[in-house]
Amino acid sequence: MGDGVLRQIGEVAERTGLSLRTIRYYEEVGLIVPSARSQGGFRLYTDADVDRLQVVKRMKPLEFSLEQMRELLAIVDRLAGDARLSKAERERMLNSLAGYREAVHERCAALRSQLATAEEFAGTLSGQMEALQSPIVTRAATSN
């Protein structure tokens, strides 16, 4: 991306895989603000807005709160856009960002563990179903 094109909400929804309702909700709670409005009042989004929505979308399944999402986005915005940060403030923000990175790694590990447990259960259940269906198939074949 990066072509400077303004996109309407429908195209943004298609690109991000988020519903129109979800995008509007994220606007309502202050996570995203459309960069412009058309003459007809339609929301218009830049590539940077779409990238911001992608960040929020990726944080959601990791169970970050709206406040945590807002804080992370603010940190990234400040670090990327304000060269006038004091060394101490920049260091504090980088430490916060590192904390988020660590939290993401921990949550991913927890999700991997949950997935392994779910896959194990699915395998067990499949094995039980096969075992329970075998006598039925055998009985049906012998009664003919």
Image: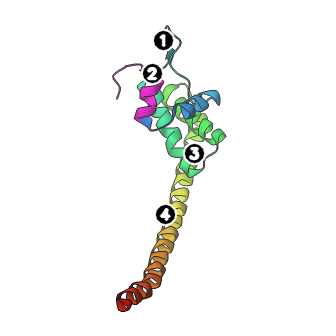
Residue numbers of the magenta segment: 1-15
4 or 2: tag closer to the N-terminus: 2
Confirm whether residue 86 shows in the render: no
Q: Position of residue 115 (x, y in %)?
A: 49, 65
Residue located beneath label 4 in the image: 112
Labels 1 & 4 near each other (Cβ < 8 A)? no
The answer to whether the residues at label 4 and label 3 have Cβ atoms under 8 Å apart is no
Nearer the N terminus, badge 1 or badge 4?
1
Question: What residue sits 48% from the left and 81% below the top?
Answer: 128
Q: Which residue is mark 1?
A: 38
Of the two numbered discs 2 and 1 on the same chain, state the one appearing first in sequence.
Answer: 2
> Could you tell me residue 63's position as x and y percent?
60, 50
**Residue on which disc 3 sits:** 95
For the residues labelled 3 and 2, the Cα–Cα distance comes to 36 Å
Instruction: State the CA–CA distance, disc 1 to disc 4.
Output: 43 Å
Question: Mark 1: which secondary structure?
Answer: loop
Disc with the residue nearer the chain's start (3 vs 1): 1
Quarter of the image for the N terminus: give it: top left
SS type, badge 3:
helix
